Amino acid sequence: MQDADAAGAIPFITLYQIDGNIQIIANQGQMATYWANYKLLLQLIAAFGKPVLINFEPDGWGFMEQQQQNPNLVFAYVQNNPDCSSEPNTAVGMGQCLLIMRNKYAPNAYVGYPYSQWGGTAAQVTAFMQQVGAGQADYIVGQTSDVDVGCLEAVASEPATCLRGTGGQKLYWDETNTTHPNFQDAFNYITAYQTGIGGNLPIIWWQTPVGVPSSTPGGTMYHYRDNRVDYFLNHPTELTAIGTLGISFVGTGGATTILTDGGQFQNLAGAYFAAPVPLP
């Protein structure tokens, strides 16, 4: 947090302790540790004394959804946490407890629940996250991808994050918004979700890859293609029109970074900050 503050940035912390290991939430000992860790995080944020963003358990909710589409039927240890003893031992209780503890220990923390499009149909994901408490948060965590599209296209590439491959699925978004998938598809999905969870929360896009546009699929280590940075920073009014408050970027695990993108991020970000658009 101090490092981010020294750089003039708002700290953006990802609470990521579950992932695909959802058996954790049904283990009393592990959840006792989970809640203790979360309480410590909040106490550190309170001591920091300035605004901090928290992203609540990316992927975890999606894996829960794949197990059971009704969060009231997903067992999670919550009542062993004295701060949330009146909440049910379910995914719903867990979602509520995250908010209850934030309110109690670190009101300077602004929180958001990420959705996982792969957790079910759009309607199922929206219903699940609405019940968990996503509509009661401060913002929506949107996500484009966790890695450059070109990294996923390069099936035989080195980084472990790329070994999923594409399975023949087209992943590169069409910047003309005429074929699918495209940017308007992503905007339509998140606005429908925004409405479905019962509010008009602002959007912060998380983990946006920083690859460079190319008509050639794939790429090489630290030089994979992607067009999210190029489109987002060249069309900022399209993002603010749907309620976008901010974008965070990432380049890890062999993917393109701001040191290997040929200056794309520096140039586009510099141009944006020279003439920023009004935020929602």
Image: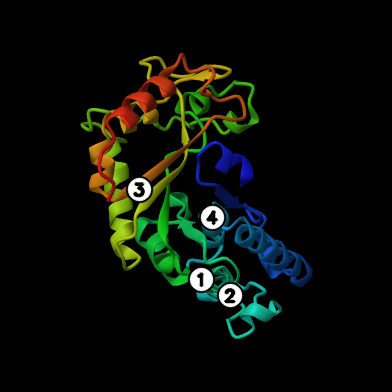
Mark 1 neighbour density, 10 Å: few (under 14) some (14–19) many (20 or more): many
Q: Earlier in the sequence, mark 4 or mark 1?
A: 4
Q: Which residue is mark 1?
A: 71
N-term mark: 1 or 2: 1
Marked residue nearer the N-terminal end (4 or 3): 4
Q: Position of residue 218 (x, y in %)?
A: 48, 19
Where in the figure is residue 131, as x and y percent of width and height?
44, 71
Helix or strand or loop: what does disc 3 sit on?
Answer: strand
Mark seen at residue 245: 3
> What separation in Å lies between label 1 and label 3 (alpha carbons)?
28 Å
Residue at 64%, 83% in the rendered image: 85
Identify the amino acid type marked 1: Pro
Q: Which is more foreground, mark 4 or mark 3?
A: 4
Label 1 near label 4: C-beta < 8 Å?
no
For marks 1 and 3, give the one nearer the viewer. 3
Give the labeled residue for mark 2. Answer: 90
Q: Nearer the viewer, residue 67 or 16?
A: 16
Quadrant housing residue 34: bottom right
Residue at left offset 52%, top offset 25%: 151
**Element marked by disc 2:** loop
Which-is-in-front pick, marks 4 and 2?
4
